[in-house]
Image (spheres, rainbow, N blue to C red):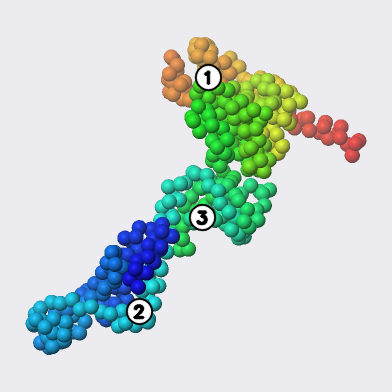
Amino acid sequence: MSFEVLETLNQIAREKNLELDYVIETLKSALLVAARKKFGTGENLQVELDQRTGEITVTAIKKVVEKVEDPTTEVSVEEAKKYDENAEADDEMEIDIPFEDFGRNAIIAAKQMLTQKVREAEREKIYEEYEDRIGEMVTGTVQQIDKGNIIVNLGRGEGIIPLKEQIRREKYRQGERVRAIITDAQRTAKGPQITLSRASPEFLLKLFELEVPEIAEKIIEVKAVAREPGERSKVAVSSLDSRVDPVGACVGVKGMRVQNIVRELSNERIDIVQWSPQPTIFVTKALAPSKIVDIDLFPEENRMTVVVDDEKLSLAIGKAGQNARLAAKLTSWKINILSETEYKAIKKAEEEEKIDIEEMTTVGKKIKSKLIEEGIETVQELLQKSKEELLAIEGIGPKTLDKLLKGAENLMKIRQAENEKEEQGKAPAETDKQAPEA
């Protein structure tokens, strides 16, 4: 029987991936609790297990006394002599407690406690294992679909792919194999909850690492990923070896490498572009194959206006703006895409609305000359400058600056009023033209 107990404990340790010492200590604790419930709450009980023979002994340390007042911690001299004929008052002795004395309920309680503690330890072990594996790609089997969430059997532990982390068009059945990336691990009352994702950019990156050895070997670096799961993705790559073409390596011979990834992602379209440290070049590549005519850069606002051929405007923007959105995510720039005709019209309007600095009457010719020397030729350019920049110009102090700004703002208000009046004058004429058609 003793060897059977030891073998059972070894089996539990193997199956639950726990240390044998932990399982043994848990059993001892369970038996100790059961013994205290049965025989009292004193601290004089102890449990030992011989790991060589598997024999379990439960003993109570009691004081030998002439008259017993507390049976849980004391034993009479007469009773003590049954265990040791040399026992005397004030001695301490260990008295074995047979398992038969525990009773059925105490044994069941000990078994339940052992099961609970082992389960808790197993859950903690699984949590710690998967917490260290966040960002790793795993393969599991679909166990069930629960309210749209996919429950995945990972062998040791369960993972869940929430609805928002799935590729919309994909449907899975029980027993099917599924790949995903671990994004989170949480402790819950039901055990560790491992969150998986197939929709994250990181999952796409892991697939590239799997299919393209040069990425895994750090010869090619993935600089950025922008993704709309199941629809389209853009991946920016760069080579650390000038002899290696990063785009070509990722595409593979006859497109085999990227096609393997496309199939895994249910035919998600993938654009691979070469990364560049120069924003205009990077954005141009990100918006390919549309032809870029011109780019206006506004670094302080992290935005740019991209001008494309009139015929290529819809291609640059993409279906429902998808191409432009992904290019903006990939490059981290706010991108405004205009056709060449729209851009020319805007530039013409801006040119017409410019107010020459010479039109200002609140300051003299000397100050105007200083402003022009600093490259400030219009009122609009003046108002775009900070007060600190203007005060740094020779001859402009706080009072002069105040006059400058007030004069510039007044001129802008006058121009705005004139434009509004002009627009109001045009409105009736346009209505008259439309009347016959109605």
The C terminus, quarter of image: top right
Residue 330 seen in the current view: no
Front: mark 1 or 2:
2
Q: Is residue 190 above or below residue 226?
A: below
Tell me whether the residue at label 1 lies in contact with that at label 2, contact meaning CB atoms closer than 8 angstroms.
Answer: no
Label 2 Cα crowd, 10 Å radius (few <14 / some 14-19 / many 20+): many
Q: Amino acid at mark 3?
A: Gly
Name the secondary structure under disc 3. Answer: loop
* Marks 1/3: CA–CA distance: 43 Å
Q: Which residue is mark 3?
A: 155
Q: What residue is at 63 percent from the left and 57 percent from the top?
A: 174
Type of amino acid at the residue the image marks with label 1: Ser
The numbered mark, 1 or 3, whose residue comes first in the sequence reads: 3
Q: Quadrant of the N terminus?
A: bottom left
Q: How many marks?
A: 3
Observer-nearest of 377 and 297: 297
Residue 408 at what x, y percent from top left? 56, 23
Q: Residues within 10 Å of mark 3 (few under 14, many from 20)?
A: few
Q: Residue furthest right?
A: 436
Report x, y in % for residue 223. Answer: 53, 31
Residue 239 in picture, x, y percent from top left? 53, 24
Residue for badge 1:
242
Residue 258 versus residue 128 in the image, above or below: above
Mark found first going from the N terminus, 1 or 2: 2
Q: Is residue 143 above or below residue 302?
A: below
Which SS class for mark 1?
loop
The quarter of the picture where residue 231 lies is top right
Q: Residues within 10 Å of mark 1 (few under 14, many from 20)?
A: few
Name the residue beneath numbered marker 2.
106
Please name whichever residue, 52 or 288, is drawn nearer the observer in this view of the structure.
Answer: 52
Left or right relative to 87: residue 346: right
